[in-house]
Image (cartoon, helix red, strand yellow):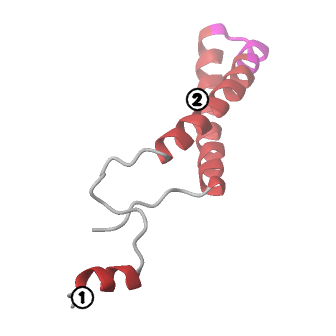
């Protein structure tokens, strides 16, 4: 089994930005379809982007602290694995 690894802060931030582009575009288009006003649709999109970017990033970082597989060791190196496998005298 692979050891539990957390994502880097940079990776979480890049994922956050890429998802926000997709989600905000969708929100703006849906808001426009409902209101037929680009100014209102863009306002909704901006507000949604700011709030959900912050919430998504915090969500990612919180999940990064959760180890759903507690039997997996977090600190496994090849040397420690060999020490664990070799019989002690």
Q: Residues within 10 Å of mark 1 (few under 14, many from 20)?
A: few
Q: Which residues are magenta?
A: 35-43
User: Could you say which is closer to the camera, residue 47 or residue 43?
Assistant: 47
> Is 1 above or below relative to 55?
below
Disc 1 target residue? 86
Residue farthest top in this picture: 35
Disc 2 target residue? 26
Residue 71 figure quarter? bottom left
Which residue appears at 54% of the width and 35% of the height?
A: 59
**Percent coordinates x, y for residue 74 in the rendering:** 41, 62
Residue farthest right in this picture: 39
> Is 48 above or below relative to 8?
above
User: Could you say which is closer to the camera, residue 59 or residue 39?
Assistant: 59
**Percent coordinates x, y for residue 1 in the rendering:** 27, 68
Asked whether 42 falls inside the magenta stretch, the response is yes
Mark 1 residue element: loop
Q: Main secondary structure of the magenta part?
A: helix
Asked whether 40 falls inside the magenta stretch, the response is yes
Mark 2 or 1, closer to the camera: 1
Which residue appears at 63% of the width and 37% of the height?
A: 20
Earlier in the chain: of badge 2 and badge 1, it is 2
């Amino acid at each position: 089994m692979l050891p539990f690894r957390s994502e880097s802060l940079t990776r979480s931030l890049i994922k956050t930005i890429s998802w926000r582009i997709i989600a905000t575009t969708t929100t703006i288009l849906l808001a426009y379809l409902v209101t037929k006003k680009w100014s209102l649709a863009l306002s909704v999109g901006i507000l949604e982007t700011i709030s959900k970017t912050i919430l998504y990033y915090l969500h990612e970082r919180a999940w990064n602290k959760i180890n759903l597989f507690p039997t997996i060791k977090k600190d496994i190196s090849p040397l420690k694995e060999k020490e664990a496998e070799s019989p002690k005298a």
